[in-house]
Image (cartoon, coloured by chain):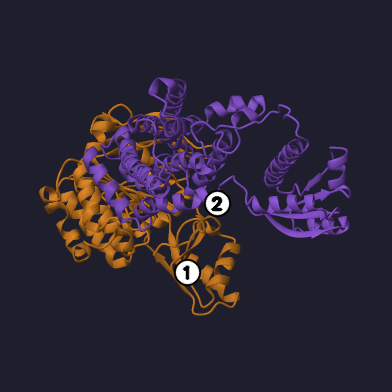
Chain colours: A purple, B orange
Amino acid sequence: MLKFLLEKEFKQFLRNRFLPKFVIIFPFAILSIFPLVTSTEIKNIRLCVIDRDHSPYSMRLIEKIKSSGYFILVNVTTNETKAFELIESNKIDIFLELPQHFESSLIKEKKTQLMISANAVNGMKAGLGTTYLSRVIDDFNNDIRISFLYREKKTPISTFVITPFYRFNPLMKSIFNMIPAILVMLMAVVCGFLPALNIVSEKENGTIEQLNVTPVNKFMLILSKLIPFWVVGFIALSICIFVAWLFYDFFPVGSLINLYVFSAVFVLAMSGFGLVISNYANSIQQAVFIIFFFVLTFVFLSGLYTPAANMPEWAQILSYISPLKYIIQVIRLIYLKGSGFFDMLPQFIGLSILALFFNTWAVLSYRKRYL
Amino acid sequence: MIQVEHIEKKYAKVNALQNISLHVNKGEIFGIIGPDGSGKTTLFRILSTVLLADKGKACINGWDVVKDYRIIRNHIGYMPGRFSLYQDLSVEENLQFFASIFKTSIESNYYLIKDIYQQLEPFKKRRAGALSGGMKQKLALCCALIHKPDLLFLDEPTTGVDPVSRKELWDMLKRLKSEGVTILVSTSYMDEAARCDRIALMMKGKFLIADTPSNIVNQYNEKLWAVSSDAMAKLLIDLKNYPFIKNYYAFGDLHHITMQANSKSDIELQHDLHEYLEKLKHQELFISNIKASIEDCFMALTGGSSDTLHTTKNYE
């Protein structure tokens, strides 16, 4: 029985003008574009410097900022109003003000004050821009301090130097954080939502009516809907892993088997969730809208963009129901840290509970509505 | 073959079925005739085990539709009113699919569908979605028959089908009957009633009457008149205002009326009406005593006047 149902599903899938191409092209397309556009490293910050000093020191600082590679120096001016105009007309993102006696007060009083002002409409750019700029200035500050000490032949005073060491992602490449998330999104769509839409479309076309009066049992029917998408989902996942290795030389440090095992549990949870949706939705339109709502909720709660620890307490509790949360953690752990199965036991338990929860719900809501 | 006892079904606010009882014998073509929304599809869905009734009991071949639904599903063929095959599979693939889920093959029951399938054969590689309306219905019938069911449910099989295909479909049903298949068919075309062995007239979730078509016609005990003139729309209004009118409705290109019983003879009645209408400047008047059809019985049973008629389809 299942064999014939599967045969039909695969036939329909392959005959679909869009889906088979989608599964092959999607991983390539999304992995070649997405990590670049979602990069959290900010470059090309437009900067204006208000230089009231025009001293060798101020020149040196400006040169140093320019050579850091993060900034585009739009203008150097002495006029504060001009800088404000530029920031208001969105021609620059940040301006740095050097006071009139920048150099002389540095030499005589051994201190001076600079001001950084940023356009915070784009909060991310403002925040990171300010951080980068202060880092460059810090660096400059150190250079000067050392040269003073050298000149005055004093023994150096001990100072702190903080050198961050990013374990597991030494270059702190945001791509390495994004790729696992992309894998997860792909799995969620292919294995969770496509079967749900497929079932709803049988309802919408009325074909379920004809199947209902045949001896096909419900369990077989649902299985025949899920299996093709599981197969397709894992093919897409494998393509993704391959493409990530090909394009970015990014390959799991940990075991691939673990990766697939966790993905399987995740897929089970997402399929269950998809089935719940398909039980409540009567048309594709309704289903798509429900899916859209939950995808957004799950993604925001997943810690993909903002760590869950930043969220208010209620949201942190809510985030436990997002399967995406666990699997993103797991894939990052396997890819970057090479964690073993038992290191990720909490995530495994979390995913298993969700899989059980959604599938039970799916079964119960199905019964309630049909027999 | 089918035993239905006091079935009731209620949707949120509508009583879809009210105290329906029905007995269909083996090997007969039983027609359920009624306007849209009278509850035909609900009854079909309950009998084909996809919907639960609120009250009552229904058995198919002695099997209960609730408890023994698995066995029943192996023995019935159901053709929903709406085209329900896979539009992205070809004609042949659809048939093959339904044959295989019933664990049979096209070849073993080919004799049942041969007459109809032969017409489809030139298009067997075409996707079902690209077939014409009549062809779709024929394919749906083939798919409902491919496992050689004892009982066939056809929910409005001729709706949206051209007259030639309609005739072919009914001829097919007749042949199936001779193969021993029991057929329960619903339709809103009154003219198809005569082709059934027995019919039930259905309205607003109730059976008005269930009998053979000829018995139903015979028990019609009123004088029925057909009237026409050069101004048919005005005529209907004038008939409505005729003091002795009982029932009046448009019927094809005539109006059918019944009049209140009195001691006058037919000729006198006809003469009076003629006079009345002539005064109202109707020309080319035609008034004749006619024999009732199934639809006239339906109208009499529903107390139908032209006010309720617009809810029913315009039958031939």
Q: Where is residue A263 in the image (x, y as percent from the top left)?
A: 39, 33
Q: Nearer the viewer, residue B297 or A299?
A: A299
Question: What type is the residue that disc 2 sits on?
Answer: Val
Task: Report whether A232 appears left or right of A157.
Answer: left
The residue tagged with tag 2: helix, strand or loop?
helix
Residue underneath mark 1: B227
Question: What type is the residue that disc 1 sits on?
Answer: Val
Q: Which mark is residue A195?
A: none
**Residue at horizontal 79%, vertical 53%?**
A56
Q: Position of residue B51 (x, y in %)?
A: 39, 36
Examine the rendered structure and indicate whether residue A325 appears above or below residue B186.
above
Residue underneath mark 2: A37
Examine the rendered structure and indicate whether residue B61 appears above or below residue B85.
above
**Residue at horizontal 50%, vertical 50%?**
A34
Would you identify the image quadrant in which residue B23 lies?
A: top left
Q: In which quarter of the image is the C terminus of chain A?
A: top left
- Badge 2: residue crowd in 10 Å (few <14, some 14–19, many ≥20): few
Q: Which of A87 and A48 is in front in this view?
A: A48
